[in-house]
Each structure stands twice: as structure tokens, then as C-alpha cells.
Amino acid sequence: MGNSIGRKRTLGIAVEGTYGTPASSATFVLPVLDVPRFELVQNKVRNTASMGSSYQTNNLMNTTSMVKFSMPVKVDEDQLPVFFKQKFTFASTTISGETTCYQHILTYSNTNYGTSYTLFFEDSDRTGSIISGVKFGKLNLVCDPKEYLKLEIEGVGKSPTTWTGTNTVTAPNEFVGKHATFNYGTYGGAKSAFSTLKATFSHNFNLSGDDTNFALGSAEMVNVATGEDDFSGAITALMPDFTTIRTDYSTNVLEQFDVTITDTSRSITGSVATTRPYIQFSYPAGYVEGWAEAGGAGDVLKQELTLTPIDKIGVATCPLTITVKNHVATY
């Protein structure tokens, strides 16, 4: 072992059957866009009892521990559904005309103790690690015309344990900005493509804190729950007129919107009917909660929208339905 650069590290992921019980190996190796690293949080307590000295601290002991992490990961149609398994239910079917291509419809669930994950952290120049009991607090889809489409991920897990296995790296499926379209329209009507410069769709799963995650008799988290969730969209677009979106904002019109991702230059692995890879984040009901002009005196004027999906009573597909077509039969 020895020193080397961070890009040699790999990170795998697998779903756990029981919270905190590590999976045996990685199902996917993630196309991480930065150095995979984790912040070890080792909580400690000082002994400041009066023991005949004017100095404050007599001893220091470990109490509880965990890891925190954040990373950007390229969007891959095979891998993306696994991240949302902790909070969504899956309906998976074989695509008509295909034998090894599948459609997955992910529907928001009210569960607070959903799926957990194991992360497999391999560094060929150092001892590897397993991080079990992982939950995601943020899964944000970022669409930029000049970049890869990516998920910005934040989460927590148990403190790492030694792992000497190997991640098997395969070529990822990838999308760039030209593969994404933002569609927008009045609720109950039709959506149409809306010319968009940049879009971020944030999915916040508010994770329980230390007062809930730790229990007597264990230094590790015994479980992590998701509390109340909150989704939003941040859209930057040109502003050809004042009226269209500003009116929706000022009169509080109920809307519907989605981001649809597909690559028409390739087929899903194993496709015999030229089925294209497909991802759609569909928000069946929501509002323009924020609107503002942007751009300086010498810039083309733009508008910035803050979109807020709602869980409309009686609409089973709210607040978000994710549809994916890929080569994976089940998650």
C-alpha cells in the first residue's frame, strides 16, 4: 500500500435486506464525479468532574459514531432507481416487444423506515471499507446543457468497517444536457416543452437526528428514519414575455411539470425493438412559488422559477412519479 491519487478509488452500492446488515457485494459501481470520501463523526465526551486540579479535563471517552457524505454521481438509467428505493414503491414490467428490457414506475410511499444501503469503498492503495446502514437525505437531479446530468447526493451511514473485496467496474450509461427536456403546463391540460437554460430538481428526505438514531448499549446507529419530505424545482429560462409565467405565479395557477431524459442515439442493452433508455421525473401537481427576473444590463434577460410540487389529495401519482426504462429486471 502507498500514497496515490483520489480518482483510483471506486464506490459500489447495494440494497440491504435488514437495516445495518451489510450486503455481500456491490450491485452497481457508481460513476462518481469527484473523489469518493466520507466524513467520520466520532462523538466524544469530556470528563470534567472536579478531581482536585484547576485543569478542566480529566479524561476523554468515545461515545457514538457515524459517517456523513456528499457526492455528485452521473445519471445512469440502470442505477438511478436504486437511490429512490428507500422512499418509493416499484412496479416493474417487461417492455412490450422486448425480453430483457424493463419499465419501472416508482411511486412515492409514506414509509418512514424504508430501504437502507451498503456502500463499498475500494482504494487499491489502502485498505477498503464497508459503510452499512446508509440512508440518503438529498437526491438532487441537476440538468446543465454543458455537463453530464447528475445526482447530487447527501447521506449518512454507520462508521466504516474494514473490507478487502473488489468492486467490478463496468462502463456506465451516461446522459448530457441535450438529452433532457423540461415540460410544463396547466394542471388538467397538456404539457409542452419549455425552453430551459438550467434546471435542478431537489428531493429532500429529512433524516432523523442523533436523538432518534442512537440507543443505549450501542455506539452505532440502530436505525435512521425519514421524516417529512420536501421536493422543489429551480428553473432558469429566457423571458420572451412578462405575462406567461409571472401570471401563473401571481394568480397561483395549479400546474404540472416534468423533466424527461432520453438518448435517441443508443438502445437499451439487449433491446430487440430499438427501445431507448428513458427517465422521467413527473410532478403531477404544483405551483410556481417563486418568480424573479435575472440578468444584468448587458445580458439577455432571464427568469428564475421556483416550483413546488404538492401531494394533491386524491391524486395517487403525487407528489412525484418516476418512470425508468432500462436493462435491470428488479431492484
Image (cartoon, helix red, strand yellow):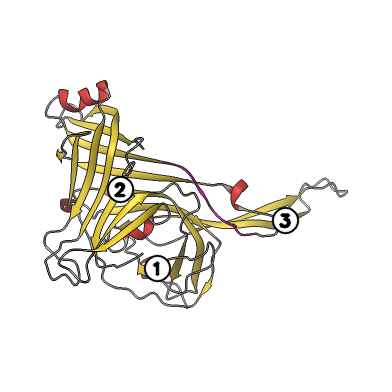
Residue 182 placed where, x, y %? 19, 43
Give the residue at the far top of this rendering. 251
Q: In 3D space, how far apart are the residues under numbered discs 1 and 3 (Cα atoms)?
A: 35 Å
Q: Hey, what amino acid is under mark 3?
A: Leu
| In this picture, residue 33 sits left or right of residue 244 | right
Res 60 label: 3
Q: Are marks 3 and 2 in contact (CB under 8 Å)?
A: no
Which stretch appears magenta?
A: 219-229
Q: Nearer the viewer, mark 1 or mark 3?
A: 1
Res 321 label: 2
Q: Hey, what amino acid is under mark 1?
A: Gly
Residue 329 placed where, x, y %? 29, 68
Q: Nearer the viewer, mark 2 or mark 1?
A: 2
Residue 184 placed where, x, y %? 19, 37
- Label tally: 3
Mark 2 secondary-structure assignment: strand
Q: In 3D space, how far apart are the residues under numbered discs 3 and 2 (Cα atoms)?
A: 49 Å
Residue 225 located within the stretch drawn in magenta: yes
Instruction: Tell me if residue 282 comes above or below residue 223 in the rendering.
Output: above
Q: Which residue is mark 1?
A: 12
- Crowd around label 3: few <14 · some 14–19 · many ≥20 (10 Å): few
User: Tag 1 or tag 2, which sits nearer the N-term?
Assistant: 1
Q: Nearer the viewer, residue 253 or 159?
A: 253
Q: Quadrant of the C terminus?
A: bottom left
**Residue located 54% across and 47% down the image:** 208
Res 189 label: none
User: Tag 3 or tag 1, which sits nearer the N-term?
Assistant: 1
Residue 299 placed where, x, y %? 16, 32
